[in-house]
Amino acid sequence: MQATTEGTMQTTIPGVIACGMDVHKDKIDACVRMGDGSADGNVIIRTFSTMRKSLFELRDWLISLNCYKVLMESTGVFWMPIYWILEEVAGMNVGVGNARDLKNSPGRPKTDREDAKWLSRLCMFGLVLKSFVVGKPFRELREYTRYHKKLVQERVRHKNRIERLLQMNGFKLSTVLSDITGVSGRRILQKLVSEGKLSVFEIRAAMNRHCNKTPEEVECAINGVMKTTSRLLLGLQLKKLESCDKEIDEVYSLMLALSKEHERAVRIIESIPGMGTESAIYIVAEIGNDLSSFRTANHLAAWAGLAPKDNQSADKVRPSKTKKANQYVKSLLVQCAWAATRTRGTRLSLWYWQNTKRLGDKKAIIGMARKILCYIYAMLKSGTTYDKSLDVAYAENMRAKKLDAAQKIVGSRKSDAPSSKQHDNDEEASLAHSQDGFHNGIGLTDKQVGSGNQHDKSGIESPNETVTPKKRGRPKKVVSV
C-alpha cells in the first residue's frame, strides 16, 4: 500500500471517494482517490492479482475504504470477472468505459499506476460515460447467442472449403444445384467420396424429387473421376460439416430453453416484419427488455451504430458515416431489414421502395434497420406487439398522396389548355389583320393586287409575285475569243 499526493490543483471533490482500475490479464492496479476537500489529491494505490481469491480481496479492500464508485477500462474480457463480483455488492456503482474515452492527457508518463490514477480522477468528476452492460439473466443468454453465431459462420467457412475443393477438381456442382450441402448435394457428395465417379442412374437415385435440374445435367457438371487424396479430404470436410450442424442444433435448443424466461419480449420483437424467433432471441440477449439506460430511441440507435456521427462546425453540418458499435446488433438488424423489404404491404417495405432511388440501396437499408430498432424500443416500452392495421393506413395514405399529386398535375394541364387555345386564336387573328394591312397599307389597287409580278414604289414584293432564287457561288468567267 502506498500513499502519494498530486500537484497543487484541485483534484478531489469533498466527500467523494472514487476508484480507478487499470486491468490486465494477470494483475490489477487499483487507485482509490480520497475526496477530503484538500488541494492535494490523496490517493492510495494497490496491486492485486486476477485470480479469483484476489478479486474477493479487492472487493473487501474497497468496502473497507468506503469506496463504492469504480471505473475501469473495457479491455477485452478481462474486466468481466471483476464486474460480476463487484456488482453483487449493494450500493456499488461499477462503470466500464470505452478505451477511446479514457486516454490520458498528453505530456504525462504512461505507466499502469499513472493510468489507474487518471481513471480515478475521471471517475470522481464523472467525465466518462459508462458503457451499457446488460443485466445478468440476459448475459447468460448472450453467451449462447454469440456462440451460435460463431458456429453458423464456421459452417459457412466449411461449406466454402468444400466448394473450393470441388472447383479445384473441375466439378461444377454449384452450377446446377443452388445448395451443394442440401439433401441432393449431400447424397451426391457422399457417393462421390465412396466411389469417386457417378453415373446417371446413381445421380438419379441420389437426387431429391424437388430438384429443378435433370440427372443428365448434373452428370455433365460432375463428369470425371476424383483423385484419392481429394476424396479423403472431401470426406473429412463433410464429417466436420455434419458435426457443426449437430452442435448448432444443440446450442439453438439451449437458446430456446433459456429464452422462455423472456418469452414476452421475444413475442413482441418477432411480430415485426422481417424478424423471426431466432433474431428476436438475439436482440433480447443484446439489449434486454429494460431499456431505461437509453433515454430515447435515438440513443439506442446511436449505441447500435445506426446513426451518423455528429460533425458540425460554424453552422455547417458535414456528412459523416455511422460509427463503430455493437457488431452483433447492427449486422443482425441489417439482415432483418433485407428480409423486411420482401414483405408486401408493410410500412417498412413501402418506405424502402419509396426512398431507395433517392438514397441508394445501402443507405436505405441502414435506415430500415434503424426503423426496426426504433419499433423495438417503442414496443418494449409499451409492451404491445406490432400493429398491422397501421400498415393498411400507411398504404392508404401513400395512395392518397399519389392520387392528390396526379390530380394536381392533371388540373394544371387543364387550366393551361384554354389559355393556349385562346393564344392560338389571337395569333390567327393578328396574322389575318397583318395580311389585310399589307395589301391596304402600301397603297396598292385591287388591279395591282390581283396581277402577278407587280412591284410598288418601295420595292416590296406582293404575295403573288414569284421570286427567282439567287444562285450561290462565284460567277462563271466569260472567256473572250
Image (spheres, helix red, strand yellow):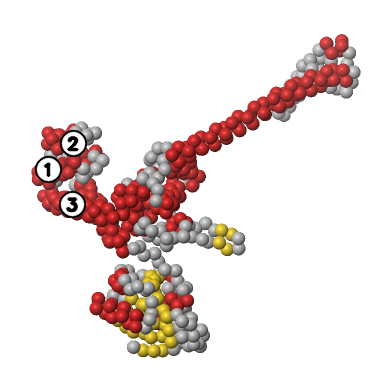
Does residue 216 appear left or right of residue 283 in this picture? left
Relative to 284, say whether 223 is above or below.
above
- Along the line of sight, the residue nearer the viewer: 250 or 232: 250
- Label 1, on which residue? 191
- Along the line of sight, the residue nearer the viewer: 322 or 481: 322
- Label 3, on which residue? 246
Crowding near the residue tagged with mark 3, few <14, some 14–19, many ≥20 C-alpha atoms within 10 Å: few
The amino acid marked with disc number 3 is: Lys
Dot placed on the residue nearer the N-terminal end, 1 or 3: 1
Cα separation between marks 1 and 2: 14 Å
The amino acid marked with disc number 1 is: Lys
Q: Secondary structure at mark 3?
A: helix
Looking at the image, which residue is at 43% across and 39% down? Answer: 389
Q: Secondary structure at mark 2?
A: loop
The amino acid marked with disc number 2 is: Asn
The tag on residue 403 is none
Which residue appears farthest toward the left when viewing the image?
195
Relative to 27, say whether 415 is above or below.
above
- Label 2, on which residue? 208
Q: Position of residue 180 (x, y in %)?
A: 22, 44
Looking at the image, which residue is at 40% across and 66% down? Answer: 131
Does residue 50 appear left or right of residue 292 in this picture? left
Q: Position of residue 405 (x, y in %)?
A: 57, 35
Q: Position of residue 354 (x, y in %)?
A: 48, 41
Res 481 visible? no
Q: Badges 1 and 3: C-beta atoms under 8 Å apart? A: no
Dot placed on the residue nearer the N-terminal end, 3 or 2: 2
